[in-house]
Image (spheres, rainbow, N blue to C red):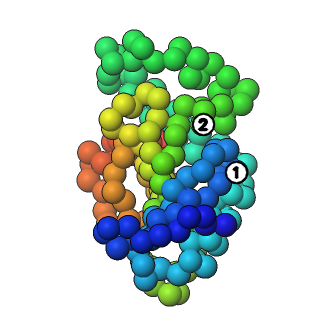
Amino acid sequence: MVKELYENDLGLMVGKFYSDVFGYDIEVMYEKGISQEYVERNIEYFNNLDQNFIINICTSLKRYYESYKKLYPDLCDELPSDILENFDKNPTSILQYVKIGVYRFHKCKASDEDIPVLNLGGHCEWAGDAGITIVAKKNHLIYVGRWQDRNVWENREESSLEKMFNYALPIA
């Protein structure tokens, strides 16, 4: 499943796999002490996500896009005008404007290795250098928003500012 696996200069294992969700290869990156079996089990989970969960991700991406347009209207002049054109009929249409570059794994307790996780990072059409991160655990979105180096296993309290720009959380 993971192809072209090697150890990079930082001692991380790096390879790639084909994403059924996005339709292209995504880089996978993890610490050397993490088992390849754990990584491949999560890739299998990712490639077989429940359609409702994918729509939940897409709805969060839509919130991120709409917020970005409100906050930075002057930067949005050159964005494709059709990003949300088909969203109501086909929420997954927004995924064509997202380019996931890496699926990242952090060390977890052995007792947590059966818990499915996502930690995806990349770019999206609307956020320029801010990029995108999608983090989930057990089919529960934890974070969707601008790129952050998130560890899915850290149980930390988000600051008010982080909560404000976390589009995995419905706007209250």
Q: Nearer the viewer, residue 32 or 3?
A: 3
Horizontal and vertical percent position of residue 62: 53, 32
**Position of 41 compared to 168: left or right?**
right
Q: Say above or below: 95 vs 88.
A: below
Q: Are marks 1 and 2 in contact (CB under 8 Å)?
A: no
Q: Quadrant of residue 131?
A: top left
Horizontal and vertical percent position of residue 150: 36, 59
- The amino acid at mark 1 is Asp
Horizontal and vertical percent position of residue 6: 47, 70
What residue would you read off at disc 2? Answer: 95
**Position of 101 compared to 164: left or right?**
right
The answer to whether one can see residue 111 in this image is yes
Q: Nearer the viewer, residue 38 or 165?
A: 38
Compute the Cα span from label 1 to label 2.
Answer: 12 Å
What residue would you read off at disc 1? Answer: 20
- The amino acid at mark 2 is Leu
Between marks 1 and 2 in the image, the one whose residue lies nearer the viewer: 1
| Residue plotted at (34% across, 51% down) | 148
The tag earlier along the polypeptide, 1 or 2, is 1
Q: Say above or below: 143 vs 110.
A: above
Q: Secondary structure at mark 2?
A: helix
- Local packing at callout 2 (Cα closer than 10 Å; few below 14, some 14-19, many 20+) is some
| Residue plotted at (53% across, 37% down) | 98
- Local packing at callout 1 (Cα closer than 10 Å; few below 14, some 14-19, many 20+) is some
Q: Quadrant of residue 138?
A: bottom right
Query: Which quadrant does the C terminus fall into?
Result: top left
| Residue plotted at (44% across, 50% down) | 121
Query: Which quadrant does the N terminus fall into?
Result: bottom right
Q: Quadrant of residue 45?
A: bottom right
Q: Secondary structure at mark 1?
A: loop
**Position of 84 compared to 169: left or right?**
right
